[in-house]
Image (cartoon, rainbow, N blue to C red):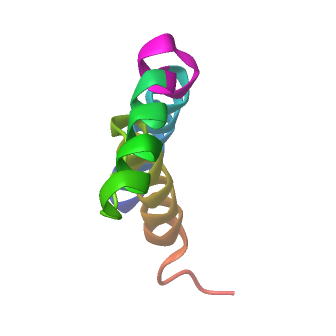
C-alpha cells in the first residue's frame, strides 16, 4: 500500500512539473513572468507566475513520494 501511494505521488509530481514547464515555455507563461517582473519593479511586492506554483508542487510531490517510498526501509 505504501509503495502504491509513493508511486502515485511521484507520478502526480512528474505530471505537475511537466505541466508547469509547458506553461513556462508558452507565450502565456512568458507574458506572466514579464508582467510579474514589471509589477515587482513598480511596487516591490512579490508576485509569482502561475507556472512557478506548478513547478514547486511537482518538486514537493516527487520528494514526498520518494520519502514515502524509502521511509522505514531496513538496510
Whether residue 13 is visible, yes or no, is yes
In the rendered structure, the answer to whether residue 22 lies left or right of residue 68 reads right
Instruction: Tell me which segment is drawn in magenta.
Output: 23-30
In the rendered structure, the answer to whether residue 50 lies left or right of residue 58 reads left
Q: Nearer the viewer, residue 64 or 44?
A: 44
Residue drawn 49% across the image and 71% down it: 67
Q: Position of residue 29 (x, y in %)?
A: 45, 24
Q: Nearer the viewer, residue 63 or 39?
A: 39
Q: Position of residue 15 (x, y in %)?
A: 45, 31
Q: Principal SS element in the magenta part?
A: helix
Above or below for 20 versus 72: above
Above or below for 35 versus 68: above
Indicate the quadrant containing the N terminus: top left, top right, bottom left or bottom right. Answer: bottom left
Q: Nearer the viewer, residue 7 or 22?
A: 22
Residue drawn 30% across the image and 63% down it: 45
Residue drawn 55% across the image and 72% down it: 70
Residue found farthest to the top: 27
Q: Position of residue 58 (x, y in %)?
A: 44, 47
Numbered-mark total? 0
Quadrant housing residue 28: top left
In the rendered structure, the answer to whether residue 16 lies left or right of residue 22 reads left
Indicate the quadrant containing the C terminus: top left, top right, bottom left or bottom right. Answer: bottom right
Above or below for 35 versus 56: above
Q: Does the stretch in magenta take in 29? A: yes
Q: Position of residue 56 (x, y in %)?
A: 44, 53
Residue found farthest to the right: 75
Whether residue 4 is visible, yes or no, is no
Q: Does the stretch in magenta take in 6? A: no
Residue drawn 48% across the image and 84% down it: 72
Q: Nearer the viewer, residue 52 or 32?
A: 32
Amino acid at each position: 500500500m505504501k509503495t502504491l501511494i509513493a508511486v502515485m505521488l511521484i507520478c502526480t509530481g512528474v505530471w505537475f512539473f511537466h505541466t508547469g514547464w509547458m506553461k513556462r515555455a508558452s507565450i502565456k507563461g512568458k507574458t506572466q513572468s514579464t508582467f510579474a517582473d514589471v509589477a515587482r519593479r513598480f511596487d516591490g511586492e512579490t508576485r509569482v507566475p502561475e507556472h512557478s506554483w506548478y513547478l514547486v508542487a511537482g518538486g514537493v510531490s516527487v520528494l514526498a513520494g520518494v520519502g514515502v517510498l524509502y521511509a522505514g526501509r531496513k538496510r
